[in-house]
Amino acid sequence: MFSIVIPSWNNLPYLKLCVESLRKHSKFEHEILVHLNDGSDGSLAWVQAQGLKYTQSAKNVGVCLALNHVVAQAGRDWVLFMNDDMVAAPGWDQAFIAAIDSVDTDLALFFGTLIQPENGGNGIIIKQDFGRTPEQFDEARFLKEYKQVAYPDKQGAASQPTLFHKKWWDMVGGYSLEFSPGMSSDDDLLMKFCVAGCRTARIVGDSRFYHFGCASTGRIKHNLGGRIFVMKWGITQIEFHRRYLPSLGSANGGVTAGNPYNCVRGTWLGKLRRAGYALRYNYPLEDIEAWDAMPGKGDWTKSD
């Protein structure tokens, strides 16, 4: 059914649990592909021993380059991007398939419903604590209680993991490298899909995943994605999430003559911030250099 792409950066205990959950809790047969950033912690040997398809970079190249590289190897039409610190719950794929069957287009984005020990007050994340690390993970209780909290589908919203059709990923250019190593690249991808005409962005309530949270992102130097987003699109991420994204939940995905958010337009706040950032900073180039001052120094490999 799906190609499942998982970037991993020396996170072997999480990666093992992630892949194991997909194998145990998938109703259908899926292709699993891993991108290994480095992989010197034993991840490369483990992936090879498991017979998984993989790509590898000799150093951590960030999620944008990693995902673009591994998605290019995917053999299925629909691709699911998930992080290695996530655990799939039973029924995750059946719920996604039902969501795909409910629309008459493949220009759509579907998202899983996350369960986390903490949600920071974010209403699209279910707060349930089944452990903070793979060693602490209470699988038996997770399997018993992961459906305990009711959560219906939510149209006009975005989360993780992300399910997309490879055709449209290729057409919009995948993850934009100016967001390397990856902060705000999800919002940028969503904006590109919207510009391409996507009017289905739906969190699927019955497709659930436990997320330990920040197992990799907490270890890296972040790019200032919010600034790059407004420099590129002329609108802040907050405005995009509060105004434009929710409009997709209205009739016909918001495609009505009276909807002021049918097309994204630059805002006064966005214009002011653009001017300030342009005069004061060198975005996105200084973020990219701070992340990797020698981008040409590194090797790329993939499985046969």
Image: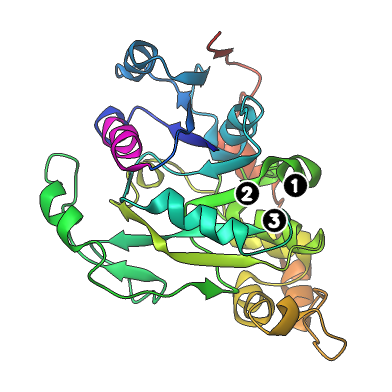
Crowdedness near tag 3: few (<14), some (14–19) or many (≥20) residues, C-alpha within 10 Å: few
Q: Is residue 213 above or below residue 80?
A: below
Q: Is residue 190 above or below residue 173?
A: below
Q: Earlier in the sequence, mark 2 or mark 3?
A: 2
Callouts 1 and 2 close, C-beta under 8 Å: yes
Specify the label residue 168 is tagged with: 1
Numbered disc 2: secondary structure: strand
Identified by mark 3, the residue type is: Tyr
Residue 239 locus on image (x, y percent): 65, 78
Q: Locate the C terminus and report the quarter of the image it occupies.
A: top right
Crowdedness near tag 2: few (<14), some (14–19) or many (≥20) residues, C-alpha within 10 Å: many
Crowdedness near tag 1: few (<14), some (14–19) or many (≥20) residues, C-alpha within 10 Å: many
Q: Is residue 5 left or right of residue 84?
A: right
Residue pointed to by mark 2: 164
Identified by mark 2, the residue type is: Phe
Residue at left offset 72%, top offset 61%: 104
Tell which residue pokes out farthest to the right in this image: 257
Identified by mark 1, the residue type is: Trp
- The magenta span reads 16-26
Q: Earlier in the sequence, mark 1 or mark 3?
A: 1
The nearer-to-camera label among 2 and 3 is: 2
Tell which residue pokes out farthest to the top in this image: 304
Main SS of the magenta part reads helix
Callouts 1 and 3 close, C-beta under 8 Å: no
The nearer-to-camera label among 1 and 3 is: 1
Relative to the observer, which residue lies in front, 172 or 104? 104
Q: CA distance from mark 1 to mark 2?
A: 7 Å
Q: Is residue 106 left or right of residue 47?
A: right
Q: CA distance from mark 1 to mark 3?
A: 33 Å
Numbered disc 3: secondary structure: loop
Quadrant hosting residue 117: bottom left
Residue pointed to by mark 3: 281
